[in-house]
Structures are given as C-alpha cells and as structure tokens.
Amino acid sequence: GYFKDDNIAANGLPTVQLVAEALNTSPNYLSGLLKNITGLNTQQHIHNKLIDIAKEKLSTTDLSVSEIAYELGFEHPQSFNKLFKAKTSLSPLAFRESFS
C-alpha cells in the first residue's frame, strides 16, 4: 500500500485525491462515506495513519525527527511537528523521551 516507507518518501504526503483514485472513487464520495461510518474524513484518517507510523518510528528507531518527517513525505519538519503535537498533545521529541 501507499503507506510503505519507500512509497511515501518517493511520492510525498498522501492526498485525499490519491487515496480516492487508488480506490476508484471520487474524493468527495470517499470523505463522505468515511465521515458517515467513522466520524472522520479522509484527510483525518491519512493524518492518523501518518502519526501512527511516526509513533512507531519514534519509539523503535534512532532516526531524527527531521528524518522521520521526510520519510513520511513532509517537506518541512515543522509541519510534521505541528501535526504531531496537534494529534498527540506532545512534541515528537517529548513522545520519544517518554520511552527512555
């Protein structure tokens, strides 16, 4: 799937459009369907998946926060830090430090 490391690093952050195309449906239909079923739209699901991957990398690797951000397709580590903190209430470094 798209969320394999090499795909994300090569293609950048996954978009709603890309996910919808992979599922042969329209972005609006997909987001509406997901929102009805889960309460979250497609973009929120993408962000949650990226944060799950980031949490795993932060807790199991010695990669820097910037390296993880780039691997996940973020052009700017600051954007990754902002999203991570919004989703977890912790900075990526604070999250990592909670494991040591």
Image: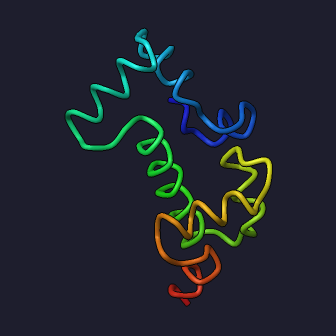
Taking depth in this image into account, of 52 and 80 the one nearest to the observer is 80
Q: Residue furthest top?
A: 24
36 horizontally vs 52: left or right: left
Q: Residue furthest left?
A: 37
Classify residue 2 by image quadrant. Answer: top right
Residue 98, x across and y down, in percent = 51, 87
**Is residue 90 placed above or below 46 in the rendered structure?**
below
Q: Residue at x 35, y 17 (%)?
A: 29
Measured along the vertical axis of the image, is residue 50 above or below residue 30?
below
Q: Quadrant of the C terminus?
A: bottom right
- Check the image and tell me how it is coloured: rainbow
Q: Is residue 91 above or below residue 30?
A: below
Query: Where, by quadrant of the figure, is residue 18 drawn?
Result: top right
Q: Residue furthest bottom?
A: 100
Q: Position of residue 47 (x, y in %)?
A: 50, 48
| Residue drawn at 79 percent across, 47 percent down | 75
Q: Residue at x 46, y 70 (%)?
A: 88
58 left or right, relative to 46: right
> Horizontally, is 65 left or right of 4 in the view?
right
Horizontal and vertical percent for residue 61?
Answer: 63, 68
Q: Position of residue 66 (x, y in %)?
A: 77, 63
